[in-house]
Amino acid sequence: MPSEQRRGADGSQRSPSTPSSSVLAAARRALTLPLLSALVATGCGLAVAGVLDLGDLSQSGAYLMVAAALLAIGLYGSTSGIDVRQTRGHVKTVLMAVTVGVLLKAALISAVMYLAFGRPEYIVLGVAVAQIDPLSVAALRGDGRLSPRARSILSAWSSFDDPITVLLTVYFSALALRAAGRAAPTGADGAMDYVFDLVANAAFAAAVLLLWWLGRELRRRREDASAASGTGGAPPARRVLGTTYLGGLLALAAAQFLMLGIALVGLFFRPLSERFVDGLVRYALLVSSFCLGLLLIQGVSPVEGMVLGALAFLSQAVVSIPITRGLPRDDRISLALGQQNGITAIILALVLQPSFPETVAIVAPAILTANLLHFAANAAWNRARRRVPDGLSR
């Protein structure tokens, strides 16, 4: 998340190969920070659903609003943690990763899922797990495996691919529903609706940017006037106003599903501290995992889920090959093994559940599978690196 991402993108030197204790420490971070807490929250939700007869929550209006609000918080948190100045040095790589890379990953996963199970609805599942979870990435920022450049690339990659994935979800959902002979939901039927959605998101972000710029200029003039007169300003009042304004933007984004727009807002409008946003997103992860558990009472599809999770992990390795060309070998391999799933995949599963009732049953074990493969593959890669002198591993 934000604070870890920025610290991980500094100019520190690559640390030497880590001993076994460091590998175990990295394992604990990877498991406890996003995965273990999510598993506990999911188990609590499953237990509550087992005791109470809640019915099909995914069809209620309140459920859809909660899912949209969680998604808006997660997307804002992802982009608000990006150090734009650090990202400017490799804009081309990041753009390739979050556009062509995400699209190819989603297409690869969806195609294999369709060929394996023959279900047109499974096309949309590739989108739900195509992104890299920024919370999980942040947990590994201090393990020294990546160079500063690669750490910055992976942090930006994991943050920017979330809103792109959300946009693809709308388009792929319509394709999957039409392929299955079902009507697409309102607002997702046809290319013009897709273009209109893009325009609406861009207009929302542009309006917020204009207001932010005007507010910043007004604040500067007031500060200059205060300095000239010898009076002080009122920073606490500005923070309260900024927090209230951000809350309104998140509510509007959730109500109108302006997810790309709120993600763009996170690039420049940051009235809250990094630590506060980090905590807010972690709470959103717990709430979304709890909701996931409530829906898992309807059943789990372990085979489809394990296949989906394995495909998500393998597709990252395939897509990263052309994107990371020119980086040192260690960085290319580490980025190829960088696939992790968490809050965005969970919330997208919640959003997709009303239209695709099997989504949660498949995506839940897929997330677990992808994260376990990530841990196992990276532990093996760390062991292999310790056997090779540092000068030969480049």
Image: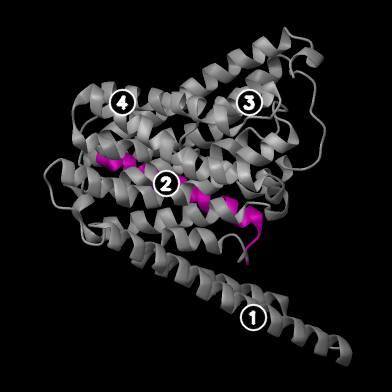
Marks 4 and 1, how far apart in space? 50 Å
Q: Which residue is mark 4?
A: 112
Closer to the chain start, of discs 1 and 2, is: 2
Q: Which residues are magenta?
A: 271-297
Label the magenta part by its dominant secondary structure.
helix
In what element is the residue under mark 3?
A: helix
User: 2 above or below 250?
Assistant: above
- Residue 44 percent location from the top left of the image: 35, 38
Q: Quadrant location of residue 361?
A: top left
Residue at screen point 60% across, 30% down: 29
- Indicate which label's residue lies in the foreground, 1 or 3: 3
In what element is the residue under mark 2?
A: helix
Closer to the chain start, of discs 4 and 3, is: 4
The amino acid type of the residue labelled 2 equals Thr
Q: Which residue is mark 1?
A: 215
Q: Which residue is mark 2?
A: 165
The answer to whether any part of residue 375 appears in the image is yes
Q: Which residue is mark 3?
A: 332
Closer to the chain start, of discs 1 and 3, is: 1
The answer to whether any part of residue 338 appears in the image is no
